[in-house]
Amino acid sequence: MRGGGARGTMVRMSSRETPERPLTSAGGSSPAVRQTLTLAAMLFAVAMTFIDQTIVSIAAPDIVRELSLSSSGMQWVINAYLLALAAFFALGGRLADIFGHRLMMVIGTLVFVVSSVLCGVVPSGGFAQAWLVIFRATQGLGAALMFPAALAVVVEAFPAGRRGRALALFFGLSGALTAVGPLLGGWLTDWTWRAVFWVNVPIAVIALALVGLARVPNVRRADRVDVAGAVLVAIGLALSVFGFMQASAWGWASAATWGCVVGGLAVLAVFVRYELTRAHPLIRLAVFKDRAFTVDMVVLFFAMLAFVPLFFFASVYAQVSLSASPNQAALFLLYFFVGFAVASQWGGRILDKQGARPALKIGSIVGAVGFALWAGKATSLSMHDQWPYVALAGAGIGFILAPASTDAVNRAIGASYGEVTGISQTVRNYAASIGLAVFGTVLTHTTTSRVFDTLHGRGVPAGAAHDAARHIAQSVTGQGDSRPPSGSGAVSSAVRDAAGSIRMDFAEANRVVFYCMAACLAVAFFVSLRHPGGRPAQVVPGEAAAAGPGAAESGAAPRASATSGTSGPSGTSHAARAFRAFRTRRAPR
């Protein structure tokens, strides 16, 4: 490809690349029918990845109880998925370019669904925790292979004039399924918690069948895999999160804890230096030279520290301290999504009229206040008293995610849309992993301390009280008041007599977690003050080449819009909005 603007096109081509083309009528089907089938196939495929971000959290107490997992072990089950998704997302996008988007989408779907089945058939016993962690990680790997490939398939299937609407539907519907996760999880858990994994099987079968019916072409291009970069980023992310997770067992004063955390961050620093020297890097880090883009990513990082981990902590809190059923816990989380949905649309309008800075500031303040007020009511043990603040916390996150993501797309002129998506997905999933690890450690330590005080105050010797408190903190099973502790010893009797107080202790520990989430949003507010403000005159990635020479300098091409389209709770609806204004045309070769 020639021409100064060609570098920025959304799907870069070389002389060895299979050309991008919309689906044709080959095989007897009209282009419109095949495009519809292709879009439906990709929606079913990525639906699994969005649902799995939240559905397992609802089943967590039942999983812990039946398999005798520790609470930190259950956090690993959830975090393994997020960590693998963060570590391999950029690599998945590059492999899809090289080996073909359809092929990697199919491989990713198969890896995901086989891993789901294996999670659902986990045997009881000492190997259960390792089994679940391993196959949740391979689920994340499958999602990392599938998602960028599915996005590329949708882009290739539709001509420029219809691509914006297709991507709006793709991201709007798939993102909205994040809200379906808790509701579906609550219903399935009433039957068996294993069904939260098995539900992916029929979805995957439908997706693969539709791929076959649509006869999706396997578009690919010759390129290199940055193996060293992929290894460095995976090691750095995994080692740092491992240190935060193990702080609950090793303690914050442990050299091993900080050795892992600092070591992981050091590996990530090496990764950054290495990528900056590469002609074909795994992640194009030069986009961080733009201050607005960097601020967008940092604000997203602090917002995601709270967003995805919230589903786990709020679900367990509702089932333990509020004695809610899985279905009731799912409805409790629905208040959050209502606030999120309303604020997402409002934040989009603010972005279109005033730029991202006001939306980020409002969202950070609203979120911080919402989480703080929710924390203040956590010990009331009443859903009725808490729901307005749950919705307010959701509204704060809603104000942030779509505007920050859309603004990042608009600002990153030097990278393709796929590269910007890869960066934002890596940042968001890494933040979610760290949030779950750190807040999980806070929850465990605070619960242990509060339960110790309760038992010791009832006459249990200090050593026995500490052991019992530690066991209780690591054995969150849900519905504690309906399943009293068994045993006839003095400690067991004290624990049984103090069941109500222990429920309150756990609520107080969750209150600390919610206050920490409020602090994350407060930090995001101060970061948002560094945003330069305004609406970027530049175009979305790839638009410079599409609009012709000089378009980027003149600002003649349209920017991404944030007001139209459905805003999915995952925050990925920014892609739909970006492509509303995006009209990609292939640069001349």
Image (cartoon, rainbow, N blue to C red):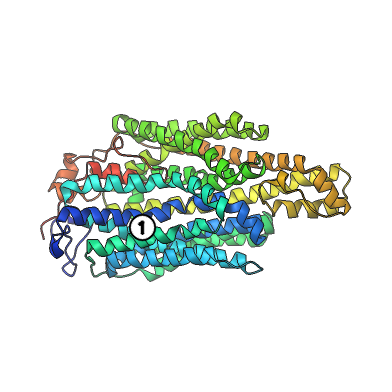
Q: Which one is in front, 68 or 561? A: 68
Looking at the rendered image, the quarter that the C terminus falls into is bottom left
Q: Which one is in front, 375 or 553? A: 375
Position of 319 compared to 34: left or right?
A: right
Give coordinates of residue 481: x percent, y percent: 72, 44
Looking at the rendered image, the quarter that the N terminus falls into is bottom left
Circle 1: residue type: Ala
Q: Which one is in front, 309 or 337? A: 337
Q: Secondary structure at mark 1?
A: helix
The structure residue drawn at horizontal position 59% and vertical position 59%, both measured from the top left corner, is 243
According to the image, label 1 marks what residue?
45
Give coordinates of residue 582: x percent, y percent: 21, 45
Q: Residue furthest left?
A: 588
The structure residue drawn at horizontal position 21% and vertical position 65%, both measured from the top left corner, is 217
Position of 114 compared to 544: left or right?
A: right
Give coordinates of residue 277: x percent, y percent: 34, 64
Callout 1: few (<14), some (14-19), or many (20+) C-alpha neighbours within 10 Å?
many
Q: Give residue 270's quadrant in the image.
A: bottom left
Position of 162 compared to 307: left or right?
A: left
